Image (spheres, helix red, strand yellow):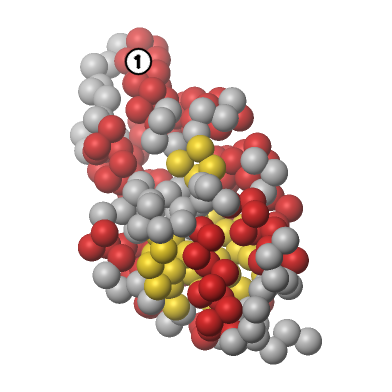
Amino acid sequence: MNNNKIKMIAFDLDGTLYFNKDFILKAYQDTILEINNKYNRNINCPSLEDIMMQTGNPITKIFKNLFINESEEFLIKISTLLLKKVVYHVINKNGKIAVGAEYILKILHKAGYKIALVSNGRSGFIVPVLKTYNLLQYFEPLYFIDGFKYKFKADLLNNLLDKYNITSDELILVGDRKSDMVSAKIVGCKTIGCKYGYGKENELDDADYKINSLFEIIPIINKENKNIIKRI
């Protein structure tokens, strides 16, 4: 029987476990070029800075913010094509996995913790990332916006609590953006803010813990549960 206070650890993906900054602008540029040629349009590609500022938002909000003059129907065309471009880069390992990601997930999994992935991203992006880097085996469950009727990460977290019959005190969320901290605060769970992620440091002001690398998670869980997770 698991008598630990923390029973489940939920991870964000982009900026927490995975980084697409090295290829995301190229994916957007190729998408917009193809869209413009196919539909005889003159859409401007957003800058890398603008793209990264949107990271962490639900995908529908990202496209509405980046392409404010486009119809919802046309945003779907951009979104669908962009996903194909992004997945190409993912499976060719043009992105980067966070240092220590597989090691830490393996330790937590072996110690008996439930490990969830809760993301505002799309399953068509998330699953290829986890499969490419052999991380899928550590996660149960996977929660992403496009797989549910919900629009916000807080809704996903509440659904997670209900489905797995755990309290907010038994869940801790690991993320890098203010939206992660706000979502966790809404449901009442603790947070680990990743200073190495995409967010500005002040976005993590409300985090219960702040880390510079994933390796710092183990001491935090040990502190919360007053036990020692053995390293492997």
Of the 4 image quadrants, the one containing the N terminus is bottom right
Query: Secondary structure under badge 1?
Result: helix
Q: Is residue 166 left or right of residue 211?
A: right
Q: Is residue 167 visible?
A: yes
Q: Percent position (x, y) of residue 81?
A: 47, 26
Q: Percent position (x, y) of residue 108?
A: 66, 66
* Residue 64 versus residue 138 in the image, above or below: above
Say which of 44 and 77 sits in front: 44
* Residue 172 versus residue 77 in the image, above or below: below
Q: Residues within 10 Å of mark 1 (few under 14, many from 20)?
A: some
For this orientation, the residue located farthest to the right is 1
* Residue 210 versus residue 72 in the image, above or below: below
Q: Tell me the amino acid under the disc marked 1.
A: Leu
Question: In the figure, residue 164 lies in which quadrant?
Answer: bottom right
Name the residue: 51% across, 28% down.
Answer: 94
Name the residue: 35% across, 10% down.
Answer: 37
Say which of 229 and 83 sits in front: 229
Name the residue: 48% across, 69% down.
Answer: 173
Question: In the figure, residue 148 lies in which quadrant?
Answer: bottom right
Q: Percent position (x, y) of residue 201?
A: 26, 59
The residue under label 1 is 33
Say which of 73 and 155 sits in front: 155
Q: Percent position (x, y) of residue 80?
A: 48, 31
Q: Is residue 78 visible?
A: no
Q: Is residue 51 left or right of residue 16?
A: left
